[in-house]
Image (cartoon, coloured by chain):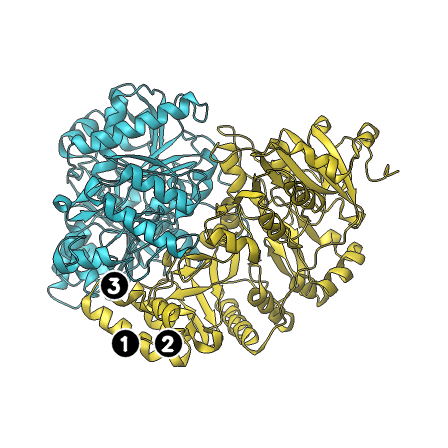
Chain colours: A cyan, B yellow
Amino acid sequence: MHSERIRLASLLDRIVSAAQAVELIEDGMTVGMSGFGGSGDAKAIPLALVERAKREPLKINLITGASLGKGLDGLMTEAGVLARRMPFQGDPILRRAINAGEVMFIDQHLSDVVEQMRDGHIPTPDVAVIEAVAITERGHIVPTSSVGNSASLALAAKRVIVELNLGCNPLLEGMHDIHIPRERPDRQPIPLVRPDDRIGSPTIEIDPEKIAAIVVCDTPETAYPILPPDDETQAIANHLIGFFEREVASGRLASNLAPLQVGVGTIANAVMYGLVDSPFSDLVLYSEVLQDSAFALFDAGRLKFASGCSITLSGDCGRRVFADLGKYRDRVVLRPQEISNHPEVARRLGIIGINTALEFDIYGNVNSSHVGGTHMMNGIGGSGDFTRNARLAIFVSKSIAKDGAISSVVPMVSHVDHTEHDVDILVTEQGLADLRGLAPRERARRIIDNCVHPSYRAALNGYFERACARGGQTPHLLEEALAWHINQQRRGHMLADG
Amino acid sequence: MHSERIRLASLLDRIVSAAQAVELIEDGMTVGMSGFGGSGDAKAIPLALVERAKREPLKINLITGASLGKGLDGLMTEAGVLARRMPFQGDPILRRAINAGEVMFIDQHLSDVVEQMRDGHIPTPDVAVIEAVAITERGHIVPTSSVGNSASLALAAKRVIVELNLGCNPLLEGMHDIHIPRERPDRQPIPLVRPDDRIGSPTIEIDPEKIAAIVVCDTPETAYPILPPDDETQAIANHLIGFFEREVASGRLASNLAPLQVGVGTIANAVMYGLVDSPFSDLVLYSEVLQDSAFALFDAGRLKFASGCSITLSGDCGRRVFADLGKYRDRVVLRPQEISNHPEVARRLGIIGINTALEFDIYGNVNSSHVGGTHMMNGIGGSGDFTRNARLAIFVSKSIAKDGAISSVVPMVSHVDHTEHDVDILVTEQGLADLRGLAPRERARRIIDNCVHPSYRAALNGYFERACARGGQTPHLLEEALAWHINQQRRGHMLADG
C-alpha cells in the first residue's frame, strides 16, 4: 500500500497516525512547516498539535513559507500553541493575538528567512513538517502545490515528518525546481538568467534517515477565496495597460513587457485579469503566488510561462486546473521562495513588480502591512523583495476605503514598508502617477493630481502647499502629518477633525 | 607634450582650455560628471560652467557618482547652474537650495542610478565630464581616485570631455576594475564571488571618437576633512568589537569576520579605527568609500584587501597614501558604484554593513537622510544598497546630539530610510542592541535598555508602555509619535513640551 507514492521501501514502516507523529514535537521546540499562500501546507500535524495542546502545555516557534490555509493558524492560536510565528500570516484569529502582543510575530522579507537561518539569526527547526505528493526511490521529498521554505526547513531540521497527501495530483511531480545556494564564503551566483530556466532538483534531497514519520492523508488542495474584479479594479487595470502601451511605444519596454511579478490579493489579481483583453502576448510571470489570473492568462493565450513558489487558486479554478494539470505543467515551475523572490534574480531579470498598497503618501512611501500604523494586517511578505529590485515597482490601491471614510493617499503614511526611493508607479482607479526621475515635491504634485479621490484632493493640496511654505526636500507639517489617521480612529473619518 | 598621459596620438589635438570645452555644454542639457565621495571629480569644467553662467543663462541636470569635493556643488548652485541634481550631495550651499525647493534633488540608491538610466527612468547625459589619470593607446579612459558612475556615464553620453589631471599619481592606472552588466534580457550573473576578484577592464572602454575635448589640469587629490575619534566613537567601537568577538566565539562569524562595508563619515570611520586594536586580522573591505581608516588598518596589518569605488582621504593621510601608492595598489581595487554597491554582490558575499544613522526609533526603523523629517542632509547614498542585503546590517550613532537637546533614539522616526526588517544591530556609546529574530515589541525593549541616553530613557519607556496598552504589532500613540521632533523645532529640546 502507498508504494507508488512512497517509493523507498524502507520508509513504508514509518507510516504512523498524526497523533503518533506529533509526539516528535516537544514543548518549546522550533518547528518548520510547509505552506505558502495557503497552499501546500501541512494539515494533519497542525490539527494534531491543537488536539495535544488540550491535554498538556505545548508552545512552539513556528516558521513556514508564508500563510497557512484552512484556518490552521487560527486553530493553533486558539489552542495556545504559537509562541512565536514567522515570517508571514493571513489569519484573522492569529492577527488578533499578534496585535494583542500574545504571539510574537517576526515579519520578514520572504526571500530572507532561510538566509537568516543559515546566519544563525533565527533558530533552525527541531522538526520540519512537509506536505508531499510522493517520496522518491532515493527517499527525497516531492512537494505539493508550494515550495516556499520547505526545502531549506527540511534540510536544516533534525527530523522530518512528511504529510503524504493522496488528494494532490501526482502530476505535480516534476514541476518543482529546487536550488539551494551554497554556504558563504563559497556562495556562487544563482545561475538563473531566464524565468523558465531550471537550475536545481525536482525534489527536496534530504537524507531519508531524517524522515521520522509519514502521515498519510487525503485532503483536497486548499481553495483560496478571491473577490471578482469590479469597476474600480478594472479602471486600475486600464490605467496600467495604457501605461504599458505607452512604454512599449516609446521603446522602453518590449512588446511582451518584462517578467511580471504580481502580489497576492484581490486587487492585483483583478488587475492581471485585465491583461486578458490587452494587446500584450508572450507574457512571462516571475512571481511568488500563481493565482487564478495566471491560468486565465494561459487559457487566453497571453501567457507563455509562469515561475512561482506556490499555486493558490479559488475553489472553481483550483478544481479545474488541478484536474487538468497536464495542460499546464510544462509551462509552470515552482521554486523555493528564496529563489522566486531573490534580489539577485529580480534585478537581473528586470521584473515589473505589481503589488497592493494599504496606503501611500504624497511622496510615494508605501504602507503594505500596518492598519493605522500599529496593527498588523498580514505582513510585508515578498513585496519588499520585489519592489527594491524591480525594473518597475508599481503599487495599486483603490483611492478610498470604508465608503470614503479612509483615503488610501495620505499626507504621511503611518508605517513605512517601502520608501519613495523604491516606488516608481502608483495607480488607483482615479489614475496613474509616473514618479520616475522626480524629486519629492514633483512626486507629490503628480500623486495628488492623478491618484487621489476627489473628496480628498483639496485637503491634500492644502496640506502640501502649507508644508512647502515651511520648506524641505520632503515638506511636512509634523503636527498634522498623522492627523488623518488620528481622526479616523477617533471620529471614524479621516477628515472629521471637528 | 602629454604623450605619456595621452597615448593615442590622434587625441592630442583635442586638448583645449576649460573655457573652450565648456562650450560643448548647452543650456538645458543633462551632464554626467565623475566624482564620488568628493574624490575623482571633474574640477575645471564645473568652474568653467560657473564662469559661463555669469554671462548667459545656463542650467543643467547634473548626474554624478555621489558627492563632489572642493565646494563645486555650492559654486554651481550659487551660479544658478543646477536645475536638477542626482543622486547624492554633501554641500551646505546646495543643501540649502534643495531644501528651499530651488534645485530638484533626486535622492537615489547609489547602485541604482545607471540601471535607471538604462531603463529610461532618467535621461542619459548629453555630455559626460570624466577626470582621468591617462588615456590609453586605444583611447580608453583611466579614471583617477574614484570610479563611481564614470564608466556608464561616459558610455551613455553623446560626447565626453576628459579632464586630464596631472596631479594624480600615475600608479592609479591598473587599480580600477570596470565591469558593465549587459542589457536585459541578456543580463548575466555578475561573476564576482570574492571581494578581490577582478571581473572587468582596468579602463573605461569608450569609442575615442566620442572624446570631444581634453582639458589638462594639475590639481591635487581632494582632501576630505574628517573628525578624529573621541570617547563616544571609541565606546561605540568597543561595543561592536565585543559583539564581533561573541559572534566569532559562537561560530556565527569566522575569525576574520566577513567582508566589511563601512559608510562614509566621522562615526563609522572612527569605529573602523577601533579595529586597529582588535583581535581580528585578515579583514577584507567590500565597501564604497575607502577612508583613512582603511589605510590605518592596512598599516596595522589588520586588513588584507579593500574593494571600493573611491578613495577619499583627509589631507595628511591623502598626501601620504597617494605619494606611496605602490605600497597599497595590489591590495586595493576600485569598481563602478553599480558593482561596489550591487544587491546581488552584497548578498552573495554576506557583507557586514556598518552605517551611520541620523536617528532611529524604538522599533529599529532608521532615518539616514532627513533632519526633522523634512530637510535633506546628504541623501540615502549607498546605505540602502548594503543594509537591505547585508548578512549583518549595523547602524551606529551617538545617543544624543546638540548637548542633549536631541535624542537619536525617538518614538517614531520622522523619516524612514531603512525599515525594521532590514536593521539587525544598533549601537550607541550607551550599548549595543542585537535585534535579530525579535518581534517589534521585543526590539523596543532591547533598544530602550541598551542604546538610549539615560536622560531620555524614562520618557521612552513611558511612551512604549502607554503605546503597548493600546495594542498592535508595532504599538504607537500617533498623536505623540512625532511630538519629540515638534518640541525640538519649537522649543529647542525634544522633551521641552511645556
Relative to B218, is A457 on the left or the right?
left
Badge number at residue B166: none
Quadrant into which the C terminus of chain B falls: bottom left
The nearer-to-camera label among 1 and 2 is 1
Above or below for A292 versus A43: above
**Residue at image coords 25%, 73%:** B465
Marks 2 and 3 in Cβ contact (< 8 Å): no
Report which residue position mark 1 lands on. B462
Q: How many marks?
A: 3
Whole-Å distance between the Cαs marked 2 and 3? 23 Å
Badge number at residue B478: 3
Quadrant into which the N terminus of chain B falls: top right
Are the residues flagged by discs 1 and 3 from a single subunit? yes
Dot 1 falls on a residue whose secondary structure is helix
Dot 2 falls on a residue whose secondary structure is helix
> What is the x, y in percent for residue B86?
53, 45
Q: Residues within 10 Å of mark 1 (few under 14, many from 20)?
A: few
Amino acid type at circle 1 is: Gly
Circle 3 marks a residue in which chain? Answer: B
Q: Is residue A135 visible?
A: no
Report which residue position mark 2 lands on. B449
Q: Is residue A313 visible?
A: yes
Amino acid type at circle 2 is: Asp
Whole-Å distance between the Cαs marked 1 and 3? 14 Å
